[in-house]
């Protein structure tokens, strides 16, 4: 649900007239290129290593004016190191000057530290919770972890909810 939520949020912002860049920062399991039917030859991992790849990696989405996408690119052996690098910070800083909004689609917080690393680069985090599957303890731990690295939670999206049954949510 995180990739779908990130994609829908980016599309909605672009439709409001904002210049939006959506980046697939899940370097272990790229999915964003599938959502928009884009090639995944050069992506964010390649851009971090070599900033001259920037023009080739940023792709416009023809069906959504104002929306550009950077796919995941080459699978990286060290995603957390790349995402937390000075090169990534410089790249995001450079991209901020060209876009009104940058949306980062990251891997799950409880599985990998990548999301925590990225939360320090972001203005805010939208936390995606799988209804009926993600336990309250995991939600609390994730929120504390984001706060612990000075990440700012803007909101929580509760998805995959079975509205036909009663649940603790």
Image (tube, rainbow, N blue to C red):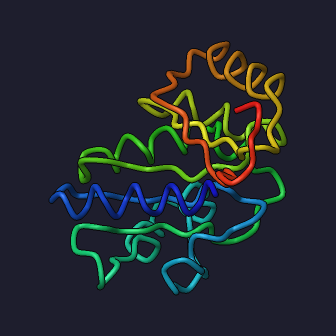
Front position in the image: 161 or 14: 161
Tell me the residue at 34%/46% (across/down): 94
In the drawing, does residue 82 fall left or right of residue 105?
right
Front position in the image: 169 or 30: 169
* Quadrant showing the C terminus: top right
Q: Is residue 90 above or below residue 49?
A: above
* Quadrant showing the N terminus: bottom right
Residue 82: x and y, percent? 68, 47
Tell me the residue at 51%/84% (across/down): 38
User: In the figure, residue 68 lies in which quadrant?
Assistant: bottom left
Q: Is residue 55 above or below residue 76?
A: below
Front position in the image: 166 or 54: 166
User: In the figure, residue 4 lies in which quadrant?
Assistant: bottom right
Residue 152: x and y, percent? 50, 21
Residue 67: x and y, percent? 31, 67
Residue 76: x and y, percent? 77, 61
The mark tally for this picture is 0
Q: Is residue 69 above or below residue 112?
A: below
């Amino acid at each position: 649900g995180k990739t779908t939520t990130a994609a829908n949020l980016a599309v909605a912002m672009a439709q409001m007239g904002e210049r939006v860049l959506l980046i697939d920062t899940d370097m272990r399991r790229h999915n964003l290129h599938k959502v928009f039917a884009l090639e995944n030859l050069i992506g964010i991992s390649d851009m971090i290593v070599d900033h001259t790849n920037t023009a080739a990696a940023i792709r416009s989405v023809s069906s959504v004016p104002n929306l550009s996408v950077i796919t995941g690119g080459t699978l990286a052996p060290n995603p957390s190191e790349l995402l937390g690098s000075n090169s990534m910070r410089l790249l995001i800083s450079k991209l901020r000057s060209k876009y009104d909004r940058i949306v980062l689609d990251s891997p799950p917080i409880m599985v990998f530290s990548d999301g925590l690393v990225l939360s320090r680069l972001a203005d805010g985090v939208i936390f995606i919770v799988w209804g009926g599957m993600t336990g309250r303890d995991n939600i609390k731990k994730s929120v504390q972890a984001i706060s612990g690295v000075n990440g700012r939670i803007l909101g929580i999206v509760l998805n995959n909810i079975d509205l036909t049954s009663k649940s603790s949510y």
